[in-house]
Image (cartoon, helix red, strand yellow):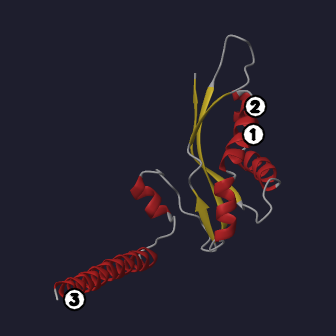
Amino acid sequence: MQSDFYKKNTWERLLLRDKIMLAVIALLVLVILIGTLFSMLNERRNTPEVLLSKGKAVSLAPPVDDEKTAYFELGTMRIVNASENTNENTVLVASAWLAYPADDTVFYEEIARKRGVVRGIMQKYFSERTKNQLLSETEEVIEKKLVQQINSRFSLGKISGIYFTDYIFLE
């Protein structure tokens, strides 16, 4: 008789343990699903307002056209310019953002992946020119040349412009 009681008690404990484990697993799955749904519903795009609030952008002029949006994550670049004589070095501090078609998330991802390439193109362009050469060129000419060089590196879309928020020479 004792063995029957022991077997019955063991089975009851196993069933109780299985029920508890299933409840814990169900609770974990429920928490994961609710968290996923909550994050998907609250997901915001990288709008200028969001970037400003995160401190990733400052003093941004909004795009003129509603069909365009901006990529602000290039950061501030400090570029040593070519010198006219060996004793004078000037440093250009530039912050830029790129205008691209709104709602083109695939192209946004390409820009984000090639952020280093874009920065490299801009650094090369400015480091090959002296301060006087850069000051003698208009912003439109610089923008046109940079847009052409940068767009040659993209395959999923094209930027429509580059806008500078900072463009300061340090001596």
Which residue is labeled 2 in the image? 133
Q: Does residue 100 appear to the left or right of 58 in the view shown?
A: right
Pick the quarter of the image with the N terminus.
bottom left
Q: Quadrant of residue 161?
A: bottom right
- Residue with the most extreme front position: 1
In the displayed structure image, the side of residue 69 where residue 135 appears, left or right: right
Residue at the disc numbered 1: 137
Q: Residue furthest top?
A: 87
Q: Position of residue 5 (x, y in %)?
A: 18, 87
Question: Where in the figure is residue 7, as x and y percent of width and height?
Answer: 25, 85
Q: CA distance from mark 1 to mark 2?
A: 6 Å
Query: Element under label 2?
Result: helix
Estimate the spatial distance between the alpha carbons at disc 2 and disc 3, rounded to whole Å: 98 Å
As drawn, 8 above or below 34: below
Q: Residues within 10 Å of mark 3 (few under 14, many from 20)?
A: few
Pointer 2 and pointer 3: residues touching (CB < 8 Å)?
A: no
Asked if the residue at tag 3 contacts the one at tag 1, i.e. Cβ–Cβ closer than 8 Å, the answer is no
The quarter of the rendered structure image containing the C terminus is: top right
Task: Report the amino acid beneath label 3.
Answer: Asp
Residue type (three-letter) at the residue carrying disc 1 = Glu
Q: Secondary structure at mark 1?
A: loop
- Name which residue type carries label 2: Gln
Tell me, yes or no, if residue 78 can be seen here.
yes
> Residue at horizontal 66%, vertical 15%?
88
Task: Identify the secondary structure beneath mark 3.
Answer: helix
Q: Would you say the residues marked 1 and 2 are in contact, meaning their CB atoms lie under 8 Å apart?
A: yes
**Disc number placed over residue 4 in the picture, else none:** 3
Label 2 packing within 10 angstroms: few (<14), some (14-19), many (20+):
few
Q: Earlier in the sequence, mark 1 or mark 3?
A: 3
Q: CA distance from mark 1 to mark 3?
A: 97 Å
The mark lying in front, picked from 2 and 3, is: 3
